[in-house]
Amino acid sequence: MRTLQLSGFDANGEPQIEVMADGTLRVAFEFMPPSDVDDRRDMGPYHDFDVQMSKAIGVPVTWEDREVFLIDAPKADTIERLITFVSTYRSR
């Protein structure tokens, strides 16, 4: 397994991409929604984060757990697109 640290999403706990031996990607966030969101019970703009991520990266995303997202069939550019999506999401 290879791990890529991401930045620009949550200063109190940045997410990471885990590249599994079979090529599956696991995107793990420390906090979802981010730690500085006032009401963490209300997901606000993060309520469909899996759909937003899938649209941005061009492949299906499964929201496995509150902080974990799986990508079973990544394409050659999926990691690059994931890095861009996560690092710029909050600056939109």
Image (spheres, helix red, strand yellow):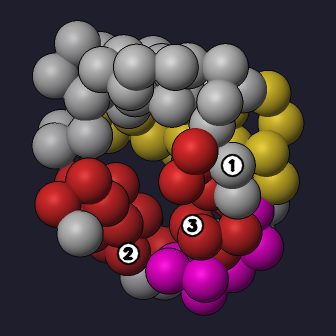
Q: Is residue 43 magenta?
A: no
Kindly identify which residue carries mark 1: 47
Mark 1 is surrounded, within 10 Å at the Cα level, by few (under 14), some (14 to 19) or many (20 or more) other residues, namely: few
Which of the two discs, 1 and 3, labels the residue nearer the N terminus? 1
Which image quadrant for residue 63? top right
Disc 3, SS: helix
Note whether 52 is above or below 17 in the view shown.
Answer: below
Note whether 23 is above or below 81 in the view shown.
Answer: above
Task: Give the extent of the magenta segment.
Answer: 55-61
Whether residue 54 sits left or right of residue 30 in the image: it is right
Kindly identify which residue carries mark 3: 53
Whether residue 74 sits left or right of residue 31 in the image: it is right
Which image quadrant for residue 17? top left
Q: Closest to the observer: 43 or 58?
A: 43
Could you say where residue 20 lies in the image, as x and y percent from the top left?
63, 40
Kindly identify which residue carries mark 2: 81
Q: Mark 2 vs mark 3: give the one in front.
A: 3
Which image quadrant for residue 43? top right
Which of the two discs, 2 and 1, labels the residue nearer the N terminus? 1
